[in-house]
Amino acid sequence: MLGCGSSVGSPVLGKDTVGVEKKDWRTRSSIILLIEEVSILIDTTPDFRQQALLNNVKNIDFVLYTHSHADHTHGIDDLRIFSYIKEDKISCFGNSHTINDIKRNFSYIFNNKNISGRPRLDLKVVNDSFIEQGIEIIPLPIKHKDWDILGYRINNFAYITDCSFISDETFSKIEDLDLLIIDSLRYSKHDAHLSVDEAILIAQKVNPKRTILTHMGSDLKYNELIEYLPKGIEPGYDGLIVNL
């Protein structure tokens, strides 16, 4: 877990940081998956460079984008070094809206007149399940308020962030999980994100072996959540490693 914070991170800029517990320091939400020799990044946050350094990330084989909001894409330029290491383009996957936004928001990357100083990326639109480097990727359509965005299932794991609604069709794709990582912004309701209690209800419906909360606002405290959450559900923290 590279980061598990909300769009503004935690602590919020301008707020007092005295006494903030280590696990309540959260960068923007992103994870990296290692499956044998394949390294899969989900989202490139504005904190990606620091996340990669802190977690000793040496390689990125491909990227899955959930959506195009700034807190999930604005570290895209730091894929540049990884594309140089790879000596090839890095494939980046997302739905059509996300891919179109990335092309527009970071047009310098895809301008062929720029022959240097940019990431080498190959953007690919996701419409259905696909195989990349021998790994099956199952996109999970969800709602982020009025946005159609994606979570992802890979093997016995599912990642769903920035979520306000999950359809029955998507629920049918997240059965028999060992691990679910799911959005949980705050205790009170929000029109674009799950609350803590809503995340609990979804976790209980999906019934994975383990559930970890992500995209948590600064008002959510790790130690308080440990006491509040039912068995099998826990708050994430930056740097958390899970072996499946």
Image (tube, grey):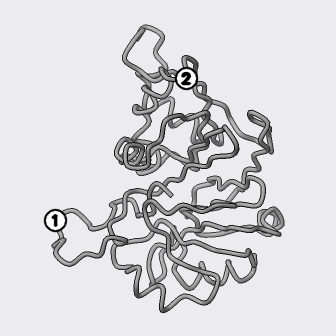
Q: Position of residue 195 (x, y in %)?
A: 52, 79
Q: Residues within 10 Å of mark 2 (few under 14, many from 20)?
A: some
**Tag of residue 109:** none
Q: Position of residue 222 (x, y in %)?
A: 41, 79
Going from the N terminus, do you reach mark 2 or mark 1 first? 1
Left or right position of 168 against 2: right
Type of amino acid at the residue the image marks with label 2? Lys
Q: Label 2 to label 1, Cα distance in Å? A: 39 Å
Identify the residue at image location x=47%, y=65%.
Answer: 215
Identify the residue at image location x=54%, y=62%.
Answer: 162
The local secondary structure at tag 1 comes to loop
Left or right position of 99 against 21: right
Picture quarter containing residue 206?
A: bottom right
Disc 2 vs disc 1: which is toward the camera?
2
164 relative to 68, above or below: below
Q: Position of residue 209 (x, y in %)?
A: 73, 75
41 relative to 218, above or below: above
Picture quarter containing residue 234?
A: bottom right
Identify the residue at image location x=56%, y=85%.
Answer: 197
**Tag of residue 14:** 1
Q: Which quadrant is home to the C terminus?
A: bottom right
Q: Residues within 10 Å of mark 1 (few under 14, many from 20)?
A: few
Identify the residue at image location x=45%, y=59%.
Answer: 239
Type of amino acid at the residue the image marks with label 1? Gly
Left or right position of 221 against 210: left
Q: Tags 2 and 1 in contact by the CB under 8 Å rule?
A: no
Picture quarter containing residue 128?
A: top right
**Tag of residue 86:** 2
Q: Position of residue 117 (x, y in %)?
A: 37, 17
Left or right position of 116 against 21: right
On the question of residue 128 being in view, the answer is no
202 relative to 96, above or below: below
